[in-house]
Image (tube, rainbow, N blue to C red):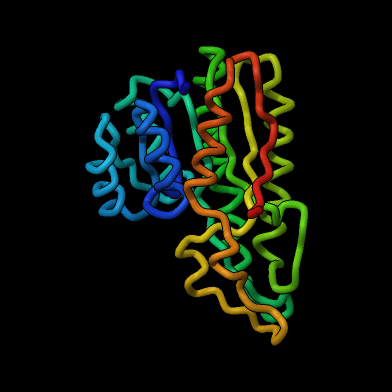
């Protein structure tokens, strides 16, 4: 049973983020929905009810994250009990042909964004000695393949940031969990094309579903306050 009353989910407009938001709302949690698409967030907030609300913003922008955090804290009366850093993008290209703009965008969204979001709320969580950071990573944080020269480095670094966060929070009353799934069947794969003749996108039937990741989040946040789920790694059976 989830005892938390409030949560924030980034990348909540679709896919994994929307599934996590639905799962939390079904447990009676009031959810702040964060993404760039304000219209999609508003539609999801209406679907969820239970006081869910849109807090649109670009997590790669320090100013946008500051404004989003102010809206969330004002609406909820403080920092959320749970912060789910889920926003991410996936682009593939050989390193020798990858535009710098692609590398920067992938790293900013998958690494810098989570840093800005956790920094926005961690001080309040420390002051009250409670909270839970959930980081949605990837099996790409331990495994590489050709043309994954931006996403994998970002996820490797995200795992390292989680491990540092966990070490710094130990004994504070604040928990931190990394959930690292394999390929998940979302619209992210719709436009992925590998340049190498021998590589194609994985079969969608052999992928996890967004609801599988949402269930892992519920498991982690449902544990007694004395239990921290450090890391969950998910793969298709």
Against 170, is 21 above or below? below
Horizontal relation, residue 221 to residue 64: left or right: right
Picture residue at 74% right of the left edge, 73% below the top: 146
Figure quadrant of residue 54: top left
Does residue 192 appear anywhere in the picture?
Answer: yes
Residue found at the far front of this picture: 237
Which one is in front, 224 or 125? 224
Which one is in front, 131 or 100? 131
Residue 222: x and y, percent? 53, 24
Horizontal relation, residue 53 to residue 82: left or right: left
Which one is in front, 139 or 92? 139
Against 237, is 170 above or below? above
Picture residue at 51% right of the left edge, 53% below the top: 209
Against 168, is 46 above or below? below
Residue 175: x and y, percent? 61, 24
Residue 47: x and y, percent? 25, 43
Picture residue at 51% right of the left edge, 60% below the top: 185
Horizontal relation, residue 80 to residue 152: left or right: left
């Amino acid at each position: 049973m989830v005892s938390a009353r409030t949560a924030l989910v980034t990348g909540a407009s679709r896919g994994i983020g929307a599934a996590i938001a639905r799962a939390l709302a079904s447990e009676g949690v009031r959810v702040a929905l964060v993404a760039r698409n304000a219209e999609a967030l508003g539609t999801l907030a209406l679907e969820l009810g239970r006081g869910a609300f849109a807090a649109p913003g670009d997590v790669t922008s320090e100013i946008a994250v500051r404004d989003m955090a102010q809206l969330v804290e004002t609406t909820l009366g403080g920092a959320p009990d749970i912060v789910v850093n889920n926003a991410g993008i996936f682009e593939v290209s050989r390193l020798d042909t990858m535009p710098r703009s692609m590398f920067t965008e992938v790293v900013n969204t998958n690494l810098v964004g989570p840093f800005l979001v956790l920094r926005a709320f961690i001080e309040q969580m420390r002051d009250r000695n409670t909270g839970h950071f959930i980081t949605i990573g990837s099996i790409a944080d331990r495994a590489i393949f050709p043309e994954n020269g931006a996403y994998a480095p970002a996820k490797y670094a995200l795992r390292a940031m989680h491990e540092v966060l966990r070490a710094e929070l130990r004994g504070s009353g604040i928990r931190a969990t990394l959930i690292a799934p394999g390929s998940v069947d979302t619209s992210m794969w719709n436009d992925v094309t590998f340049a190498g003749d021998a590589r194609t996108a994985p079969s969608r039937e052999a992928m996890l579903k967004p609801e599988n990741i949402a269930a892992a989040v519920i498991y982690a946040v449902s544990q007694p306050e004395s239990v921290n789920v450090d890391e969950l790694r998910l793969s298709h059976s």
